[in-house]
Image (cartoon, rainbow, N blue to C red):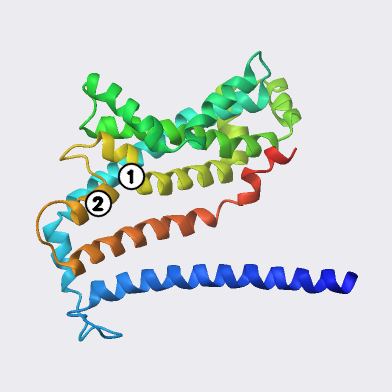
Amino acid sequence: MRRGETVSARLWASSVWVLVGFFVLNLLAMIAAVVVNSLGTRWFNTWLPQGFTTKWYFSAWDEFQLGDVLFTTFQVVGAVVVLSGLLGVPAAYALARREFPGKRLVVLLFLLPLLVPPITFGIPLATVLYRAGLAGSISGVILANLVPTVPFVILVMIPFIEQIDPRVEAAARVFGAGTLRLFIHVLAPLLAPGILAALLLVLVRTIAMFELTFFTDGPTSQTLVVALYYAVYAAGVRAGQSIDAMAVIYMVTTLVWLLIALRFVNPTQIVGRARR
């Protein structure tokens, strides 16, 4: 019986690895096809293009006004990262250190934007912003993106805060440290890795956030992912290589920041609180 169970376990493990390998292979093949096409001159019914060139990147930069799009993207992302940190870190500290009636309900309300698809609350949110006259501007895009990013910062920061011994804070208060000084000189250095990890992950999420930005943006507030969508589906004839070049720029931008984030965050820390 044990031998049969061992064989079954090995077959199951082999099947899982085959499926994972098949998925990774398909993913790499799709990315490689986009990258190769963005550098190819012509590509019809052959394994590789007839030639390679970088002109499509310059063409995409001019045709899609990528300079303005990237500037707008970094404006939105920078504002969302800063505001998410200023709002999310104190809220996470309050939820980690304070007990009050209805705390679980408050935590649940904070986590709802992370549990439901953005399109579910994106349309009502965009309606409210349009009625308030904020949609169609960078301010509206920033406010829309704060809805999921602030709860995300809270979720990431709570395990980091709970790892700090409350006696450290008590000792600082005994020696006369007020709340502001306590945070700046005691908590901030200890929480720096968590804050940096949370904000870097917020940066990656904001760059990749399509639905909320698409519902609330305007002609001068499009981020890179929305501009890529318009490049693919808007009316008119465009070279496929230029669109793929734009997609490569988007992938590289997101991948670089994701790799930086993963150097500072341990994914097990995010779920550590749920295991307690």
Residue 157 x/y as whole percent = 58, 37
The residue that label 2 is drawn on is 229
The residue that label 1 is drawn on is 210
Give the residue at x 34% y 42%: 77
Residue 163 x/y as whole percent = 70, 38
Observer-nearest of 179 and 161: 161
- The local crowd at label 2, few if under 14, some if 14 to 19, many if 20 or more residues have their Cα within 10 Å, is some
Give the residue at x 45% y 36%: 149
Number of callouts in the render?
A: 2
Q: Left or right: where does residue 9 sit relative to residue 150?
A: right
Q: Left or right: where does residue 169 sit relative to residue 28?
A: right
Callout 1–callout 2 Cβ contact below 8 Å:
yes
Give the residue at x 69% y 34%: 162
Report if residue 57 is visible in the image. no
- The local crowd at label 1, few if under 14, some if 14 to 19, many if 20 or more residues have their Cα within 10 Å, is some
Instruction: Identify residue type, mark 2.
Output: Tyr
Identify the mark nearer the N-term, 1 or 2.
Answer: 1
Observer-nearest of 170 and 236: 236
Residue 66 x/y as whole percent = 19, 55
**The N terminus lies in quadrant:** bottom right
**Element carrying mark 1:** loop
Residue 52 x/y as whole percent = 22, 82
Instruction: Identify residue type, mark 1.
Output: Phe
